[in-house]
Image (tube, rainbow, N blue to C red):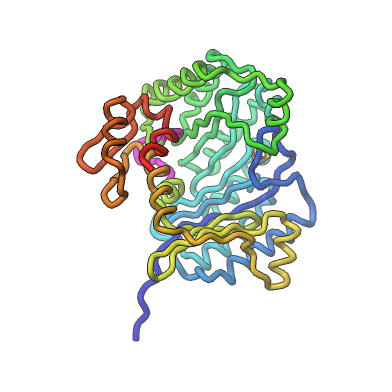
Amino acid sequence: MSQLPRPPIAVYVHIPFCPTKCGYCDFNSYAMEGEIMESTTLATIAEIRRSPWAGRPATTIFFGGGTPTYLAEGQLLRILEAVLESHPPVDRAEITSEANPGTVDIPKFKAMRQGGFNRISLGAQSFLDDDLVRLGRVHRSGEIERAVSSAREAGFDNVNLDLMFALPNQSRHGWEKNLDRALALDPEHLSLYCLTIEQNTAFYKERLRGTLPLPDDEVQVEMYEQCVRRTKEAGYEQYEISNFSKPGRACQHNLAYWNAMEYAGYGPGAVGMVRDDSGLGTRYTNLKHPDGYVAAVAAGKALAFESETLSESTLRVERLMLGLRLNEGLDVEGLSVDTKSLDRLVNRGWVERSGQIIRLSAEGRHFCSEVALELI
Ligand code: SF4
């Protein structure tokens, strides 16, 4: 009897190393180097090879972190090779690596391009050195321009820049200068996020001490509106609250998350979401610290330290929260949205409705969480 083809899946690989820990960072990243990088590389390859989802084609592949490009290109490419073997990519699959400007050069980008990566996401964050120092980043602004030009020279025609606004002491003028420099580089994609202060970060402690002077809410709203206006003028389409792309260059990997599609996660702290044959989803998180992860792989132990079966009600809440972020809107058919709440939001001007599709208005984008909570 012939076997049914296995359904495709998005693939995420987490590389948990960074040269230093930034003041605002609550990602699973560690300022470690040396032998642990090689042992984590080998463990990640072993995890990918023994994955229960091996054999499912990859719709997209995304290396995030941490700083994937803090690994040597040989390590990065050995992990990619394992992914490509276990998850043969679909035709024209997007294969992204995050990269930090201070950890790349033309030979590294060339090796990555030849190895199969076809998209680079650069953590630029700011084009002003004072901001970069304040954030604790290791790169300086000139390195961003050099990194983009190196990526182009290596053959990457799909480049994203991540930038953050509402930084300590940042003015509207400072943010405008950032947008000028970013747009001058003509990237295919821009992710523009408002800085959020997470617990267990150095910035959180500073805010408690009162030594973190952040722009007030009104200025943050204006900065966001600068993002929307400037990107639109430059020919970008906004397809998600914080994401803007040239036509046809939306990030397919992020769209997979936002559309609640399945994804396999590999590496320390990686998160995955997979469904069983009945469609029931499970989300798991791998052991976070590289030492514990490497030891668990070597001992053949379970790697997930957290695993949650996603009930229908959890899935409904997530579909609402994530779908509302997308500019194409959300089909509320079957989501049991309260009609009175929806009418109220439409009358308030925060939500637009067209049949079963709802989407946030320009004003509503400032209140995504409030809208989602009201609809839930
Ligand atoms: S580069 Fe990114 S992941 Fe690494 S410490 Fe800074 S914010 Fe965290």
Q: Residue at x 53, y 67 (%)?
A: 85
Q: Position of residue 89 (x, y in %)?
A: 45, 61
The residue lying toward the viewer, choosing from 56 and 370, is 370
Is residue 247 part of the magenta span, yes or no?
A: yes
Identify the residue at the far left of this view. 355
Quarter occupied by residue 248: top left
In-front residue for pair 287/335: 335
Point out the stretch of residues depicted in magenta: 241-252
Kindly report the secondary structure that dominates the magenta region of the rendered protein.
loop
Q: Who is closer to the viewer here, 147 or 248?
A: 248
Q: Quadrant of residue 233?
A: top left
Whether residue 308 sits left or right of residue 331 in the image: it is right
Residue 52 in picture, x, y percent from top left: 53, 71
- Residue 81: give x, y in percent of width and height: 57, 62
Looking at this view, name the residue that lies furthest to the bottom.
Answer: 1
Residue visible at 37% across and 24% down in the picture: 363
User: As displayed, is residue 190 above or below residue 348?
Assistant: below
Residue placed at 45% from the left, 46% from the top?
A: 254
Name the residue nearer the viewer: 265 or 278.
Answer: 278
Query: Residue 360 at x, y = what percent?
Result: 34, 32
* In this rendering, position of residue 297 left or right of residue 149: right
Is 66 magenta? The answer is no
Quick one: quadrant of the N terminus?
Answer: bottom left
Question: Where is 317 relative to 218, above or below?
Answer: below
Q: Quadrant of residue 201?
A: top right
Answer with the quadrant where ligand 1 appears in the image.
Answer: top right
Please state, as top left, top right, bottom left or bottom right, where the C terminus lies in the image.
Answer: top left
Query: Is any part of residue 78 visible from this angle?
Result: no
Q: Is residue 275 visible?
A: yes
Which residue is at a point 46% across and 29% down the rendered structure image? 186
Above or below 155: residue 297: below
Mark count: 0
